[in-house]
Amino acid sequence: MRLFIAIRLSDEMRTALVQCMHDLKKQGVEGNYVPAQNLHMTLAFIGEYKDPDKVKKVMEKVPLPQCRLSLSEKGNF
């Protein structure tokens, strides 16, 4: 199983990102546009790992402060 550590985005943030994707598509920007329910911010990519429960147990022990995200610019690379 491919594992990664990510931040779940609020419905409001996902809606804003979907709008950005639509704008980029209108401008002819090609790429892999993912469905809104799959949008997230990856913090670390773990890769192939056979025991996701082990990773989850470790993550539950890590104190994670709340954070606030905002969109300010868009672009492509």
Image (spheres, rainbow, N blue to C red):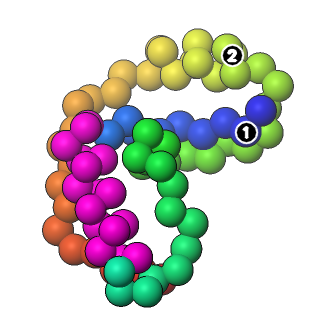
- Secondary structure at badge 1 equals strand
- Secondary structure at badge 2 equals helix
Residue 20 image position (x, y, % from top left): 29, 67
Depth check: 48 or 28 in front?
Answer: 28
The magenta segment: 10-25
Q: Residue at x 40, y 76 (%)?
A: 25
Work out which quarter of the rendered image holds the N terminus and state it: top right
Depth check: 58 or 30 in front?
Answer: 30
- Picture quadrant where residue 18 is located: bottom left
Q: Would you name the residue on which mark 2 appears?
A: 54
Q: Which circle marks residue 2 in the picture?
A: 1
Residue 23 colored magenta?
yes
Asked whether residue 72 is in view, the answer is yes
How far is mark 2 from mark 1, CA to CA?
14 Å
Q: Amino acid at mark 2?
A: Lys
Depth check: 25 or 56 in front?
Answer: 25
Label 2 Cα crowd, 10 Å radius (few <14 / some 14-19 / many 20+) = few
